[in-house]
């Protein structure tokens, strides 16, 4: 947390609501309570979703719908709307919407929160809950032809899945093509140099201008949630977060799981381990932002740009440090519940001096990037005032991370919902008011410098840490079995924004439901807002500035 | 214009300083960190066939076959499927399985990546580094261990 | 103006072979054209698979090709074999004759441009195929055939990306051809001739002398403003960064050449490089004194080579350093900026020349 900013949210005038006040506010809408470890939970009827959420949004200020997590129980379906406040994300409330087991229908929250659109589509796709009043309830991750809902209880995983698209299409569906229109439909991706993975953009063009763009995701869906549900809390889940946002943001992702699981099982992490975690996580953030910068330069400058290679060089340097620390360059598996697996590498002095060397040369590199891209007139021409995302829209879509901060939304979980060692350190949250591609890039570049500041302070702390107090892992039992029916949603500030984990324990050593709130998923949803009406190159630039990783979008 | 000039100056500076970041790979074998995790090495002499590695493995990469007296018969590891999380090494009570720093392995088919215990035993050390010593200095290294000297069975 | 220059290359060959009259002209012209064409193609052969990679690698702190032969030079035949040995994939629904002609037209038009370029002396030989009175106009005419080829390729490929690329090529060429030629006109006003050899000759005077070193009246030095204008327009004309929008691999995945493979792709690739060298040659002739440079006239060709390779290096430098502009911005720069500036330059030059002369 910044020491220069005394008006932290705690002292700010964000009204706190205790659960009783909220219950009174909602009145008859509440039919029961189902509290989670992180927030009070109100059970409501499935046909009052919009009413409840708009009261909470407008009268109590819960303006951030983090995630919609859905699951099936023995006797019912359930959708949970995890609400937060952008001004103070520690104020949370869960809205639990049970739906009938035989015909799971629930009212859509899309008219209240735009972000619910994709989240509810995902719930429909994987669990099978139908959302009334949803503008476009189609499958999102799985192919349109898929039969059954894989995370529902009666799903037959052995049933054949061969259904061709022609046999699946609706014969009386309206045909959009006509002789009058002047537009052209263009598939960008799934194999396109600038989609940063297997993303498919269905674009409608009017000349060079984009009339409409729709993202088609799911090509990299690997059932990460189900894999986590089949893994034990203690060991087997931790390697997988590395593979969500796989571009070296691994430690940040691991922290999301570690934080949620530690709070679920009530594990205290030693302070020394927290400092190491903080340092490692910020190294990952630098690596991730360097790649974001590199690929953004690639998208705007065209291939063979030198910027790409310079940024990759810097990323390699920080990856060398991470390799020394964790033993791997991408898939770290370094965090354990209750701490980290290793202390700093011996000899410690060498590691400190290597890290300091890196931190010393970093300002020079950043200066070079400013010379190469941000001060370049052509680059400014290309990025300033393109891909506009107004702050209100960003909030409505649940955009977080550099995307939201580039639109002036002052939201950073490291400061607003402190974890690790962040609140003891001196650093700033970066925001830019430009709302365009350029500001998002600037935010990332400045965050790299802030991360360097954090790493520097961590190094100083670690260097002076008394040898006998270097406790890297709390004493955690070999098998963890959190109490039955405890639920938790916890988020951390990952490289792309708020990465949250919702978990429900059922008394075994494996989670009964594991839901990932991916920042890229929500951020990508804003693409049409930025791209419609712009030129093709601006769509590419906007996509680059969103810095999505398909591994995290599709999970 | 000044911004354009700056960009050109920066790239030219890099072109003229003569430094390269890439290396000629097979000739310049890279130094990996002591903690780096590569292909596994298995010591049948040490193994007590407790099957903890098999249990902890997140994606069923390790397969152990025992006879009816619980004596170990087979120890198979699919190094192409492995995610190199090192949990097997972490849970092993006798350090019978280690991840060497060796990352250079090739095969013609995917099936060739299924290593049996003999193949796992013959995985070479990378540059003669014993990874156990660098990762957990307090645990005994087995780099120079002779055949059959220690047998926990 | 334009005193009869030294003996041209075809005439030299005819004379050396001792054939006179019409047969001499034909034989001489064919042999000379073959020699010049091969020199230019050899440049592109070196530039494409090897020099381009090495230069880009230098800018990006890499090593690049160094495995085959000294400095990796044998990558050139290796790449040639590799590219030509690939299967030529003909996509369904392409507009057949057009689709086949386009990749031939691009290198052909660029090579044709070299017919009138005075490439200087190499020993006793004057490496120029023809020196018509309207040389400069002719070379621009040849060079702009290239955009026809791009449109043909884009339109015939039956691919939306290709079509976007082809259309971008037209828009770009329209926007830049005019400022390019208008700027070149200012040179013509200076030189008083359209003949290429005459333009070169007009740049041989001494502008001023520094420390006993003669600075020639190269138009780049006489009128640097026009030089920058011409350089910019030339970059757009040959479609290099920051004006590589007809290809724009990160946007429209290679534009007009998306669907081409194997030999056709090689032809496009070749054509682009010949085009870069032609752009360099035009620049050298109009602004950099052609083949002139220190030393005897007989090594003029070497200076010429240095100049066009210098231009090639510049395009690669720009590619490493500059972002690509957007198509609408390019049109705006072309029509609203460059056109106005080039006309201003033309009028100013005319006035100055009129007053001085």
Image (cartoon, coloured by chain):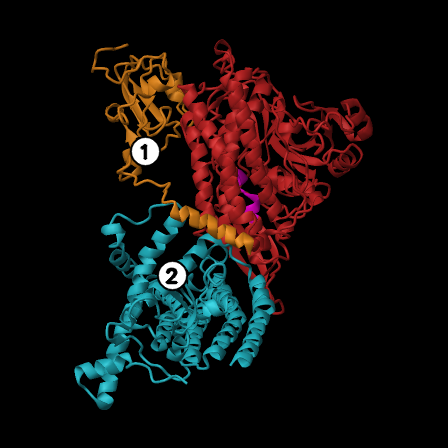
Chain letter of the residue beneath label 2 in the structure image: C
Would you say B56 lies left or right of A87 here? left
Q: Residue at x 30, y 62 (%)?
A: C45
From the rendered image, report the letter of the chain displayed in cyan.
C
**Marks 2 and 1 belong to one chain:** no
Residue nearest the viewer, comparing B69 with A300: A300
From the rendered image, report the letter of the chain displayed in orange.
B
- Secondary structure under badge 1? loop
Give the number of callouts.
Answer: 2
The image position of residue A284, as x and y in percent, is 50, 32
The image position of residue A350, as x and y in percent, is 41, 23
Image quadrant assignment for residue C134: bottom left
Residue nearest the viewer, comparing A406 with B75: A406
Is residue A547 highlighted in magenta?
A: yes
Q: Which residue is mark 1?
A: B30
Q: Chain A's colour?
A: red
Would you say A102 lies left or right of A149 here? right
The image position of residue A81, as x and y in percent, is 68, 33
Dot in front, 2 or 1: 2
Q: Is residue A236 above or below residue C290?
A: above
Q: Is residue A171 above or below residue B30?
A: below
Would you say B12 lies left or right of A540 here? left
Q: Which residue range is magenta in the image? A: A543-555
Residue nearest the viewer, comparing A183 with B133: B133
Is residue A234 highlighted in magenta?
A: no
Q: Which residue is mark 2?
A: C310
Q: Residue at x 58, y 22 (%)?
A: A420
**Would residue A491 be visible to someone looking at this image?**
yes
């Amino acid at each position: 947390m910044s020491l220069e900013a005394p008006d932290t949210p705690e002292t700010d005038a964000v009204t706190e609501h205790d659960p009783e006040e909220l219950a009174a506010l909602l009145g008859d809408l509440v039919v029961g309570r189902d509290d989670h470890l992180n927030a009070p939970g109100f059970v409501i009827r499935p046909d009052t979703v919009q009413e409840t959420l708009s009261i909470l949004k407008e009268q109590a200020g819960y303006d951030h719908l983090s995630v919609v997590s859905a699951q099936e129980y023995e006797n019912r379906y359930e959708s949970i709307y995890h609400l937060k406040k952008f001004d103070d994300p520690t104020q949370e409330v869960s809205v639990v919407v049970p739906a009938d087991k035989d015909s799971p229908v629930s009212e859509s929250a899309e008219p209240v929160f735009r972000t619910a659109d994709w989240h509810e589509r995902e719930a429909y796709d994987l669990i099978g809950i139908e959302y009334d009043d949803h503008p476009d309830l189609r499958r999102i991750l799985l192919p349109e032809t898929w039969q059954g809902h894989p995370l529902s209880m009666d799903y037959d995983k052995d049933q054949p899945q061969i259904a061709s698209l022609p046999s699946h299409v609706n014969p009386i569906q309206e045909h959009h093509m006509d002789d009058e229109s002047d537009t052209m439909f263009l598939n960008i991706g799934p194999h396109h140099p600038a989609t940063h993975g297997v993303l498919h953009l269905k674009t409608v063009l009017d000349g060079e201008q984009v009339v409409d763009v729709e993202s088609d995701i799911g090509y990299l869906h690997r059932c990460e949630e189900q894999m986590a549900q089949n893994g034990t809390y203690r060991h087997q889940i931790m390697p997988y977060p590395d593979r969500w946002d796989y571009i070296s943001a691994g430690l940040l992702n691991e922290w999301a799981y570690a934080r949620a699981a530690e709070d679920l099982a009530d594990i205290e992490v030693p302070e020394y381990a927290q400092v190491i975690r903080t340092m490692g996580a910020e190294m990952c953030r630098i690596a991730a932002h360097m790649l974001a910068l590199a690929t953004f330069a690639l998208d705007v400058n065209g291939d063979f740009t030198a910027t790409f290679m310079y940024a990759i060089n810097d990323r390699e340097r920080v990856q060398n440090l991470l390799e020394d620390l964790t033993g791997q360059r991408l898939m770290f598996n370094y965090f354990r519940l209750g701490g980290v697996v290793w202390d700093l590498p011996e000899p410690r002095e060498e590691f400190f001096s290597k890290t300091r060397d890196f931190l010393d040369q970093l300002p020079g590199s950043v200066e070079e990037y400013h010379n190469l891209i941000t001060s370049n007139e052509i680059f400014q021409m290309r990025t300033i005032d393109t891909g506009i995302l107004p702050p209100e829209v960003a909030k409505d879509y649940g955009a977080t991370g550099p995307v939201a901060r580039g639109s002036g939304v002052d939201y950073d979980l490291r400061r607003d919902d402190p974890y690790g060692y962040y609140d003891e350190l001196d650093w700033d949250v970066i925001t830019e008011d430009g709302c365009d591609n350029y500001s998002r890039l600037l935010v990332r570049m400045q965050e790299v410098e802030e991360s360097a500041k954090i790493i520097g302070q961590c190094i100083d702390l670690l260097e002076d840490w008394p040898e006998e107090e270097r406790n890297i892992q709390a004493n955690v039992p070999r098998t963890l079995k959190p109490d039955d029916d405890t639920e938790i949603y916890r988020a951390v500030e990952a490289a792309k924004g708020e990465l949250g984990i919702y978990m429900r324990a059922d008394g075994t050593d494996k989670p009964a439901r594991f839901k990932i709130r991916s920042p890229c998923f929500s951020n990508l949803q804003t693409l049409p807002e930025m791209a419609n009406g712009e030129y093709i190159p601006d769509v590419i630039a906007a996509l680059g500035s969103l810095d999505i990783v398909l591994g995290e979008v599709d999970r | 214009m000044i911004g354009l000039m700056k960009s050109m100056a920066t790239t030219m500076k890099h072109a003229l300083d003569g430094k390269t970041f890439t290396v000629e790979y097979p000739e310049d074998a890279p130094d990996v960190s002591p903690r780096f995790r590569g292909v596994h090495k298995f010591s049948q002499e040490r193994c007590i066939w407790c099957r903890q590695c098999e249990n902890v493995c997140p994606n069923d990469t390790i397969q152990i076959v025992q006879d009816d007296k619980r004596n170990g018969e087979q120890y198979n590891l699919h190094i192409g499927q492995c995610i190199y999380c090192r949990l097997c090494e972490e849970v092993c009570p006798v350090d019978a399985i280690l991840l060497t720093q060796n990352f250079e392995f090739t095969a013609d088919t995917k099936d060739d990546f299924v290593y049996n215990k003999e193949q796992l035993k013959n995985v070479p050390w990378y540059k003669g580094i014993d990874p156990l010593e660098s990762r957990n200095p307090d645990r005994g290294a087995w780099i120079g261990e002779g055949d059959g000297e220690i047998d926990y069975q | 103006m334009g005193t009869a220059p030294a003996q041209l290359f075809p005439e030299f060959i005819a004379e050396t072979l001792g054939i006179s009259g019409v047969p001499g002209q034909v034989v001489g012209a064919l042999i000379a054209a073959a020699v010049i064409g091969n020199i230019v193609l050899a440049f592109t052969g070196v530039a494409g698979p090897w020099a381009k990679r090495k230069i880009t690698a230098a800018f990006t702190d890499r090593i690049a090709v160094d495995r085959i032969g000294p400095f990796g030079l044998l990558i050139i035949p290796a790449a040639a074999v590799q590219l030509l040995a690939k299967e030529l994939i003909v996509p369904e629904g392409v507009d057949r004759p057009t689709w086949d002609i386009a990749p031939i037209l691009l290198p052909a038009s660029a090579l044709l441009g070299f017919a009138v370029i005075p490439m200087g002396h190499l020993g006793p030989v004057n490496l120029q195929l023809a020196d018509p009175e309207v040389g400069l106009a002719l070379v621009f005419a040849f060079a702009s055939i290239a955009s026809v080829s791009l449109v043909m390729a884009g339109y015939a490929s039956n691919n939306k990306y290709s079509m976007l690329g082809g259309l971008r090529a037209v828009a770009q060429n329209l926007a830049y051809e005019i400022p390019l030629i208008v700027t070149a006109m200012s040179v013509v006003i200076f030189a008083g001739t359209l003949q290429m050899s005459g333009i070169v000759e007009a740049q041989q005077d001494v502008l001023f002398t520094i420390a006993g070193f003669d600075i020639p009246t190269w138009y780049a030095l006489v009128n640097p403003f026009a030089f920058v204008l011409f350089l910019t327009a030339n970059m757009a004309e040959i479609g290099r960064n920051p004006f590589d929008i007809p290809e724009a691999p990160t946007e429209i995945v290679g534009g007009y050449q998306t669907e081409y493979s194997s030999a056709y792709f090689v032809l496009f690739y070749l054509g682009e490089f010949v085009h870069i060298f032609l752009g360099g040659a035009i620049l050298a002739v109009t602004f950099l004194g052609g083949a002139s440079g220190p030393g005897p006239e007989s090594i003029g060709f070497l200076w010429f080579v240095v100049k066009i390779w210098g231009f090639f290096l510049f395009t690669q430098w720009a590619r490493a350093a500059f972002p690509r502009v957007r198509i609408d911005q390019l049109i705006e720069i072309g029509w609203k900026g460059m056109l106005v500036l080039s006309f201003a330059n033309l009028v100013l030059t005319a006035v100055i020349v009129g007053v001085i002369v």
